[in-house]
Image: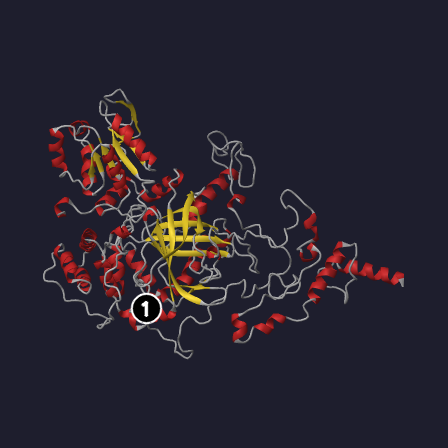
């Protein structure tokens, strides 16, 4: 009997070493032989699943909305589910066994950061390179040899360094930050970032223009992307928005047409990063639903001062879902703590020539200097019943929900406090997808949003070479990733075990479905609609009101803002080569406001005006709000701080040295950056024997790159040294920027009058009060009301 038992163990041990067949029964547990014990435990795991009990909850409405966690079992031996028993054979490369239940490809980025301090140069295979200056040749003057694998690797990698740029939002800037919950809202959503006050969530933010290519300018008149990736404890959530709360179109079916129209015209590939051309206006003038968005695009919102002074919006209506499965509609707003500030068009055009990286540079320098951009996250939450009473449809991406109807509720603050280590690895390879949501966040039936859910994922697969773009370090979540997806281009994870399917028993049923308490559950009913409603290609009637909110936006602007909008329309439409398109757009603007349309037409030589464009909805519902205090840029002045702002301070040899030093100290104390501007860079001896080192000059930095000026030198002296000093002052007056100016004598007064009338609204003297008021003015929205308009 004992002999027979030993023979059975030998047979079991032998069978355990086969990979193509096995005995009818395994050996009893407790054997010293690892291969045999692995077979025993694998069999035990499989035996613990006599059937798939999870199938029982796949049927019926109750099971559909309250899924239980998947059935699973745990092996008593860590190597029972291993790919190989040899995982215990440790090496410097292979390492040891996998950490149980742990995916090492996700987590903090320091696992992949690289630093070469005190290291020799190597190939990508780790071979030290003796000579990185010369190719391998057959003799000093001979041909390069094919065997030079170092040259071939280096050149081949260089040839493939670029990846396809984004179709839209190609030009972007990014930063790391933290989001802190300031009001817990578990009654509204189970989303991880909002569960307790003080909870912080890492984020990566990418700002971008939309129409321009990767190498285009920052200051184009354009929509700006405002995309935030939350690395939450329950997975990644991408809030992919813009700096405008509405969009050009109502249905994703029209998205390719919109982008084709706004991109450079295909026959000559111009203009770059601009909407002022025939094809864009041809399209939008035939799409009256675009009118509201056009008002925003022609406003100062389209040329922000910086990313730090730019609002962000989720654009679409989403859903919050709480732990009980109850849901409400929600719209997201990012409010810059520094306020909403813009450039003027003349200033933006000049800046684009002097520094096309103006916004990118500003964001980088703010963070490097500790002037961290901050944004409050505000929400608008409302019920389906409330939405049904609105005069517009909340599923229409060309409409806003006025704050007068649903006030903003601030629930958190985001601080951007770390620049990327590598632009390509982080900012360029980061992949945002509207489909990336977490438990507690769900979609609405917005037809534009539905198309984006598909489009973004599809685009990233094309750009980043395959379906594993989520394993790139910048895209990898902080939460653990475990599923049965395998292989594909650029796969990073080395999955342990033989199982790549579900349900299974050989891996103890793992990874198992989380169930409704932990996992993502789609809201069972997205709309209060009859189940038998037919599938149609149409839109609700409220979507046909294309002009009411465009008029709301226009009527909510200050007079200078309205003037800027009219000038923007005139500029864009004047660039068209087809007069009929220009007239068609004017016909559409007549449905917004006759007076506004007339002011645009007057600058285009259109007389008489074309007939108003026929409306898709003649009897539009009466709007709840006809003028909103929240839609003007001036409604959100910010905290008045000057962090990150650049102020030019004139210095010339023999000039006043005391005031520039004092003002610079006050500017720095307030968080700003005061730069000494001279006719040249370098040290200058001032009249009071003070030496000042000019760090920039009129030659290398144009005046319109500064947010304000300090002029304590004689204007005649400045003009004699370099007339560009006077151009600085002219531009600052024209762009309505604060100027601290000390008038030395009567000749200064006459020269100043020739530049522009001395305007007390934007000019300040060198007294203590004047300096304080000047610094205060830098942090406020610009006073665009010129002296002649003041009463």
- State the residue lying farthest toward the front: 769
How many marks on residues?
1
129 relative to 567 in the view: left or right: right
Is residue 663 left or right of 511 when viewed as pictured? left
Mark 1 falls on what kind of element?
loop
Picture coordinates of residue 600 (x, y %)? Answer: 16, 56
- Percent from the top left, x then y, of residue 408? 35, 58
Relative depth, front residue between 765 and 91: 765
Residue at 39 percent across and 78 percent down: it is: 533
Which of the pair 359/213 is nearer the observer? 359
Q: Position of residue 255 (x, y in %)?
A: 34, 62
Residue behind mark 1: 393
At which x and y percent is residue 28?
A: 79, 62
Residue at x 69% of width, y 65% of height: 46
Image quadrant of residue 676?
top left
Residue 279 in view, yes or no: no
10 relative to 557 in the view: left or right: right
The quarter of the displayed image where residue 543 is located: bottom left
Q: Taking 579 as reference, is 67 above or below it?
A: below
Looking at the picture, does residue 699 appear above or below residue 553? above
Would you say 36 lies left or right of 356 here? right
State whether residue 347 appears in this view: yes
Location of the N terminus by quadrant is bottom right
Q: Quadrant of residue 481?
A: bottom right
Q: Given the current orientation, which residue lies at the most extreme top position? A: 689
- Which color scheme does this rendered protein use? secondary structure
Specify few, some or many for label 1: CA neighbours under 10 Å numbering under 14, 14-19, or 20 or more. Answer: many
């Amino acid at each position: 009997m004992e002999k027979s038992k030993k023979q059975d163990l030998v047979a079991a041990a032998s069978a355990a070493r086969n990979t193509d067949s096995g005995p009818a029964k395994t050996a009893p547990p407790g054997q010293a032989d690892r291969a045999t014990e692995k077979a025993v435990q694998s069999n035990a795991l499989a035996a613990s699943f006599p059937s798939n009990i999870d199938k029982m909850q796949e049927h019926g409405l109750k099971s559909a909305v309250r899924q239980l966690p998947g059935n699973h079992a745990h092996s008593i031996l860590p190597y029972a589910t291993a790919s190989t028993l040899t995982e215990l054979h440790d090496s410097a490369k292979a390492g040891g066994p996998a950490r149980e239940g742990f995916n090492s490809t996700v987590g903090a980025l320091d696992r992949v950061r690289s630093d070469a301090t005190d290291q020799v140069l190597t190939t990508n295979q780790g071979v030290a390179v003796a000579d990185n200056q010369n190719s391998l040749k057959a003799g000093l003057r001979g041909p390069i040899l094919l065997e030079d694998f170092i040259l071939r690797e280096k050149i081949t990698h260089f040839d493939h360094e670029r990846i396809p740029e984004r179709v839209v939002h190609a030009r972007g800037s990014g930063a790391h930050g933290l989001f802190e919950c300031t009001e817990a809202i578990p009654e509204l959503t189970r989303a991880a970032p909002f569960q307790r006050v003080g909870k912080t969530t890492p984020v990566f933010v990418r700002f971008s223009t939309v129409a321009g290519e990767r190498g285009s300018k920052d200051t184009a008149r354009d929509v700006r992307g405002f995309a935030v990736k939350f690395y939450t404890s329950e997975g990644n959530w991408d809030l992919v928005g813009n700096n405008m709360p509405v969009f050009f179109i109502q249905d994703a079916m029209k998205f390719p047409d919109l982008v084709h129209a706004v991109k450079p015209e295909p026959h000559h590939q111009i203009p770059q990063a601009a909407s002022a051309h025939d094809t864009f206006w041809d399209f939008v003038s035939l799409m009256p639903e675009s009118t509201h968005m056009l008002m925003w695009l022609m406003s100062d919102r389209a040329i922000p001062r910086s990313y730090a002074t730019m609002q962000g919006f989720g654009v679409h209506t989403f859903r919050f879902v709480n732990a009980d499965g109850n849901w409400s509609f929600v719209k997201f707003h990012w409010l810059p703590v520094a306020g909403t500030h813009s450039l003027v068009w003349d200033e933006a055009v000049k800046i684009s020539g002097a520094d096309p990286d103006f916004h990118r540079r500003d964001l980088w320098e703010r963070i490097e200097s500790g002037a961290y951009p901050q944004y409050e996250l505000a929400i608008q939450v409302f019920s389906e019943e409330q939405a049904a009473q609105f005069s517009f449809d909340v599923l229409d991406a060309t409409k806003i929900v006025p704050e007068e109807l649903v006030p903003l509720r601030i629930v958190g603050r985001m601080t951007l406090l770390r620049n990327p280590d590598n632009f390509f690895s982080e900012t360029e390879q980061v992949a945002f997808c509207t489909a990336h949501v977490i438990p507690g966040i769900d979609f609405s039936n917005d037809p534009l949003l539905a198309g984006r859910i598909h489009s973004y994922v599809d685009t990233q697969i094309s750009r980043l070479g395959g379906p594993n773009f989520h394993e790139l370090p910048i895209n990898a979540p902080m939460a653990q990733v475990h599923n049965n997806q395998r292989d594909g281009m650029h796969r990073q994870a080395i999955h342990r075990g033989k199982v790549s399917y579900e349900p299974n028993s050989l891996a103890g049923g793992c990874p198992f479905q989380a169930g409704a308490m932990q996992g993502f559950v789609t809201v069972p009913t997205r709309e209060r609609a009859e189940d038998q409603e037919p599938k149609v290609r149409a839109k609700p009637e409220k979507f046909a009101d294309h002009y009411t909110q465009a008029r709301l936006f226009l009527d909510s602007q200050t007079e200078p803002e309205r003037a800027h909008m009219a000038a923007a329309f005139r500029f864009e439409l004047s660039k068209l080569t087809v007069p009929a398109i220009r007239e068609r757009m004017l016909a559409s603007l007549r449905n917004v406001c006759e007076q506004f349309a007339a002011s645009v037409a007057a600058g285009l030589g259109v007389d008489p005006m074309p007939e108003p464009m026929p409306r898709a909805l003649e009897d539009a519902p009466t709007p709840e709000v006809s003028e909103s205090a929240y839609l003007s840029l001036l409604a959100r002045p910010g905290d008045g701080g000057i962090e990150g702002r650049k102020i030019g301070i004139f210095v010339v040899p023999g000039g006043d040295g005391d005031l520039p030093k004092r003002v610079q100290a006050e500017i720095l104390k307030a968080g700003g950056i005061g730069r000494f501007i001279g006719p040249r860079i370098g040290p200058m001896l001032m009249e009071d024997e003070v030496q000042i080192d000019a760090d920039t000059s009129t030659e290398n930095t144009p005046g319109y790159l500064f947010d304000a000026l300090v002029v304590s030198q004689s204007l005649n002296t400045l003009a004699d040294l370099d007339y560009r000093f006077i151009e600085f002052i002219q531009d600052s007056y024209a762009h309505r920027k604060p100027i601290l100016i000390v008038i030395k004598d009567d000749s200064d007064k006459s020269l100043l009058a020739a530049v522009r009338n001395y305007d007390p609204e934007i000019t300040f003297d060198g007294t203590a009060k004047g300096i304080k008021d000047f610094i205060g003015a830098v942090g406020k929205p610009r006073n665009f009301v010129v002296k002649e308009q003041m009463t």
